[in-house]
Amino acid sequence: MKRLFLLWLAFWGLGLNCAWSQDTASPYQVNWLRDGVITAGGIGASVVGSLLIKNKDRLTEADLVGLSKDDVNRFDRFSAGYYSASAENASDYFFYGSFATPFFLLLNDHVRQDAPQVFLLYGQTMAIAGGLYSLTAGLVDRKRPNVYDTEAPMDVRLHEYAQNAFYAGHTAATAAATFFVAKVFHDMNPDSPARPYVWAAAAAVPATVGYLRLKAGKHFLSDNILGYAIGTSIGILVPELHKHGSRVALVPTSTRYYDGVGLVYSF
């Protein structure tokens, strides 16, 4: 978590230092103050969520007595008891490697000339993804599948993060990074025949992470599906909401039940 936090700070700082000069040919429009506040809010949410996670009550051996896979819903029950240290280690390679994928965009001339904007938006994407995950994991207790494996090492079953199954943070963060790259490449290279392949790669990497986290016993299938969906949405929506002429917008919303913001698509 600390490494992710430092990465977000680095990307945010790069964007803030350079975002003053914008190329009018860019498909995106950023605002230093607005986007800086949003990014800082995401980082702040991540810090608060990390504190909530740290202060969670840890499982004890007494909690494992009588623990049954039947307590898990039918959709996810098949993976209760999964555990694989090798799958967990493999997932980390894809997870951390995905954070470097935006740098491949610098190989593209269209992206390179607007790199400050792109990396500001990338920092914002990862800050939002990290903040949302941290708060959710800090507020929701759900035992990981490996807790149900009676043959798994006790330090694994009683790990301080053993109740952070909901939702899959690795999958969400990876999807946010790779789909951000695909979206930016798509927007800045409208005539490129490589676009379908970039989207396919963007989809495959977090799917691989989700599969490995499932086999590792870190998350149930529903946790991975939700994490994939959330990460994908953030990775696509952040650049889309900053795009000139975008048909998608966040607008203030007031109903009988709540006041907030709504996502609107203009046909």
Image (cartoon, rainbow, N blue to C red):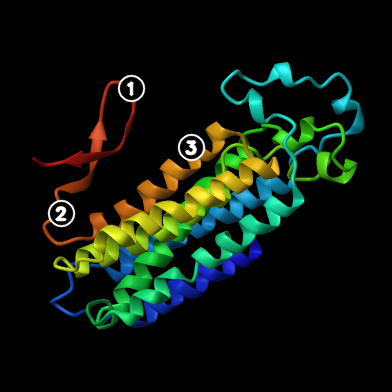
Q: Secondary structure at mark 3?
A: helix
Residue placed at 42% from the left, 61% from the top?
A: 39
Which residue lies under the disc numbered 3?
225
Q: Position of residue 90 (x, y in %)?
A: 65, 58
Three-letter amino acid code at the position of disc 3? Ile
Which one is nearer the viewer's eye here, 90 or 36? Answer: 90
Query: From where the camera sits, is residue 157 visible?
Result: yes
Distance Cα–Cα, label 3 vs label 1: 28 Å
Q: Position of residue 91 (x, y in %)?
A: 62, 55
Q: Secondary structure at mark 1?
A: loop
Mark 1 or mark 2: whose residue is earlier in sequence: 2
Mark 3 or mark 2: whose residue is earlier in sequence: 3
Three-letter amino acid code at the position of disc 2? Ser
Mark 3 or mark 1: whose residue is earlier in sequence: 3
In this view, the mark in front (3 or 2) = 3
Which residue lies under the disc numbered 1?
257
Query: From where the camera sits, is residue 28 visible?
Result: no
Which residue lies under the disc numbered 2?
246
Q: Residues within 10 Å of mark 2 (few under 14, many from 20)?
A: some
Q: Are marks 3 and 1 in contact (CB under 8 Å)?
A: no
Residue placed at 70% from the left, 34% from the top?
A: 145
Q: Position of residue 52 (x, y in %)?
A: 66, 45
Residue 1 falls in which quadrant of the image?
bottom right
Residue 211 falls in which quadrant of the image?
top right
